[in-house]
């Protein structure tokens, strides 16, 4: 069963804003990568999600189609105060496939398909994978 998220339409300047937002998130990625203690260093910890031993960052409000349930996702411990965190990730959210993207590069996460947000892996240089950039830039065609 697929649910299409239509609350954001990617056209013209909206598309450019999404690309700029992705670039801003890439800059945050440096501060949100796992720390030596296994937590997440300072940054926007709410925008970080773990799934299948990988860390994903929120892409923002982008139009996408939610696919099948992929498994459990969770927010990693957040080290936003500089202290050492002994907490482990609680996998208490549902990860869904994103139609048109492999789960190795992007997932949708939420309590339900209707409320799921798009999260993507970032490359070591802080950029989104090319397929995610293309997906965001052009939106997904039905």
Image (cartoon, rainbow, N blue to C red):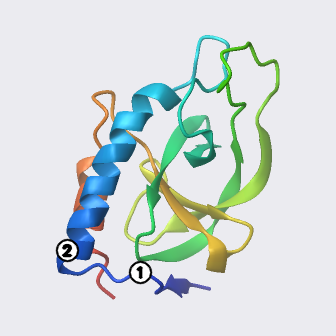
Mark 2 vs mark 1, CA separation in Å: 12 Å
Are circles 2 and 1 on residues that touch, CB within 8 Å?
no
Q: Quadrant of the C terminus?
A: bottom left
- When the figure is inspected, residue 3 is found, relative to residue 42, above or below; the finding is below
- Residue farthest to the left, as pictured: 12
* Residue beneath disc 1: 8
Dot 1 lies on which element? loop
Identified at 81% across, 18% down, the residue is 86
Nearer to us in this view, 2 or 78: 78
Q: Nearer the viewer, mark 2 or mark 1?
A: 2
Label 2 packing within 10 angstroms: few (<14), some (14-19), many (20+) = few
* Quadrant assignment, res 123: top left
Q: Position of residue 65 (x, y in %)?
A: 47, 78
Q: Closer to the camera, 36 or 11?
A: 11
Mark count: 2
Judging depth in this view, the residue of 15 and 64 nearest the camera is 15
Residue 138 visible in this rendered orientation of the protein? no
Residue displayed at 72% across by 31% down:
77
Q: Is residue 130 visible?
A: yes
Residue 67's place in the image compared with 56, above or below, is below
- Point out residue 49 in the picture as x, y percentages from the top left corner: 61, 45
Asked whether, in this view, residue 121 is left or right of residue 49, the answer is: left
Q: Is residue 63 above or below residue 84?
A: below
Q: Position of residue 109 (x, y in %)?
A: 62, 61
Q: Which residue is mark 2?
A: 13
Quadrant of the image for the N terminus? bottom right
Mark before the other along the chain sequence, 2 or 1: 1
Provide the secondary structure element on which disc 2 rests. helix
Position of residue 135 measured from the top left corner of the image (x, y, whole percent) = 29, 66
In the current view of this chain or complex, which residue is farthest to the front? 81
> Residue at the spot x=68%, y=22% of the render?
81
């Amino acid at each position: 069963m697929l649910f299409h998220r239509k609350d954001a339409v990617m056209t013209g300047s909206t598309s450019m804003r999404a690309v700029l937002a992705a670039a801003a998130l890439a800059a945050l990625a440096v501060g949100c990568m796992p720390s030596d203690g296994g937590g997440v260093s300072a940054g926007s910890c709410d925008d970080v999600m773990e799934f299948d031993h990988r860390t994903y960052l929120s892409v923002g409000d982008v139009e996408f189609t939610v696919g099948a349930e992929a498994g459990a996702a969770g927010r990693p411990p957040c080290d936003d105060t500089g202290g050492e965190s002994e907490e482990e990730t609680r996998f208490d959210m549902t990860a869904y496939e994103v139609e048109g993207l492999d789960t190795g590069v992007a997932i949708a996460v939420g309590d339900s398909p209707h409320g799921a947000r798009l999260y993507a892996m970032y490359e070591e240089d802080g950029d989104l994978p090319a397929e995610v950039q293309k997906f965001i830039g052009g939106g997904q065609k039905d």
